[in-house]
Image (tube, helix red, strand yellow):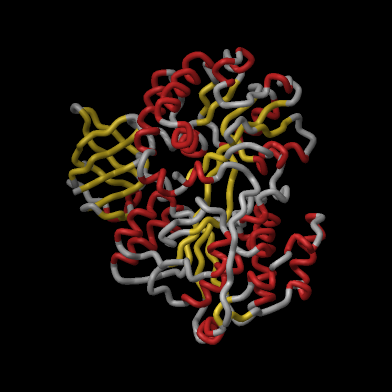
Amino acid sequence: MSSAKAITSLGAVVALALGLGFAAPALAAELPKATQDILKKLKLDAGILAGLDQELKFPKSWIAKAKKEGRLKYIGTIGLEEWSSFSAPFKARYPYIKFGYIRSNRFGRVTKPLIAYREGRVITDIIAAIGSQVKEYKRLGALADLRDIPNFKNVVEGMRAKDGLWVGERLKYWCMAYNTKLVKKRDLPKTWDDLVTNPAWHNKNLGLANRPNNWLLALWNHQGEKWGRDFMAGLFGTSNPQLRKEGIRAMVSLTTAGEFHASIPATSYRVGTYADKGGPVAWHCPDPATATISELVMLNNSPSPYSAKIFINWFLSKEGQITQYYATEASPVHKDLQDKGLLRFAGQLVGKKVALRHPHLLETIYPTVLKAWDKHWQSAGGPMAPKGAMRKVRVSLSKIKRGGRRLFFKVKGKEHKVKISRSRSRIIIKGEDSDRGKLKVGMNCTVTYPGNGGEAKVVDCK
């Protein structure tokens, strides 16, 4: 059974058995003031933390070992302002663990630690959101097994790896934003197919961002390849949406302004931000709802493994998950918090199945989905965005400028230039991930890019 199909509805419950010989740092009745304040601001009764005493138990030996370790290093995606409120309860419970948190882009968060590991160096303990690079980290044997962390089993099945090499930290649901002044409730799609069959969504009424990885990948996996191809053809053909180059936040803003009746994809918390300001916008999920999981990994041979395990155990507890919801508005992965309304527009998910995008899908079927999507997007005249991949050429690099930020090469006798993004462009040299600073004139490379002057997606050099 696929992990997407394993999550059939909110409120899925998995039994958890805890062993003996564990240490409990604090009773739930003695909640840190930071936790009490968070519950008050979220208007949640402390009863939602029932069972927290058991969840905060872990082997006693971890404490003594953690106290001997240095600073715990965590590279993630949580904003620095959000980090302050998120980490406060943990620091109150475990003052002997010193944190070194870094918020970084994909290169600093994923590629840089990977390159270091290949060279025999471990530069962090924990990393968030490594996505499709899970495969490469596995190949190097870089990921620690997290199944000895007690709260690993408290994460919904399908939101944690069967081999224990990654665990979900939080969820983002990707559905649609709609303008409440322009859309009649009876026209809101019950399923995704309604976007094709209902004329209310035709003729440029729907704004579409070039981000199939956020929503369509999970649907393709959940509904099957035939459905995915048929839906894609109908969406671009029959529905005839506005194909936009803007990012996700801007799409919600344009929906609120009435540029189009609705936009895809959109997260609930982003729509909620505009709704709170009085904008005529709301969030709607056709069935099945689509979600992406941000995965957490711990590196083998990490400098502070026991501090890392204590933190991850807390993060996956009810307290940790509620705290991260308060800080980031991302939904929890804890099995007992799936039906507690910890989501903006939570009523949109009641009774609906969930199609989940997890790292395995990025490793396996995403190239197929992206190829089909790009073909439709280009044929319909869609503007380029970072996720697009228009052409692939085998060339020799003729010039390199600005430390690898600009590459030049000839295609059929004409000079082409591409931009290289530190976070979005993938650089591969001799089969291994690298960085743009190591590119050299004369290298023979396969460049995947949207066209002359665009941003390269992949530069693969021998």
- Image coordinates for residue 342, horizontal then vertical, percent: 70, 50
Question: In this view of the protein, can residue 211 be seen by the observer?
Answer: no
Question: Where is 258 relative to 153, above or below?
Answer: above
Compared across the picture, whether 394 is left or right of 210 comes to left
Q: Quadrant of residue 419?
A: top left
Q: Quadrant of residue 251?
A: top right
- Image coordinates for residue 106, horizontal then vertical, percent: 45, 53
Question: In this view of the protein, can residue 402 be seen by the observer?
Answer: yes
Compared across the picture, whether 339 is left or right of 19 comes to right
Is 290 in front, or is 271?
290
Q: Residue at x 44, y 27 (%)?
A: 228
Question: Where is 284 relative to 111, above or below?
Answer: above
Q: Residue at x 70, y 56 (%)?
A: 326
- Image coordinates for residue 196, horizontal then vertical, percent: 54, 18
- Image coordinates for residue 198, horizontal then vertical, percent: 60, 15
Question: Where is 309 relative to 268, above or below?
Answer: below
Is 313 in front, or is 201?
313
Q: Residue at x 65, y 74 (%)?
A: 91
Q: What is the total number of numbered labels drawn onto the structure image?
A: 0
- The quarter of the rendered structure image containing the N terminus is top left
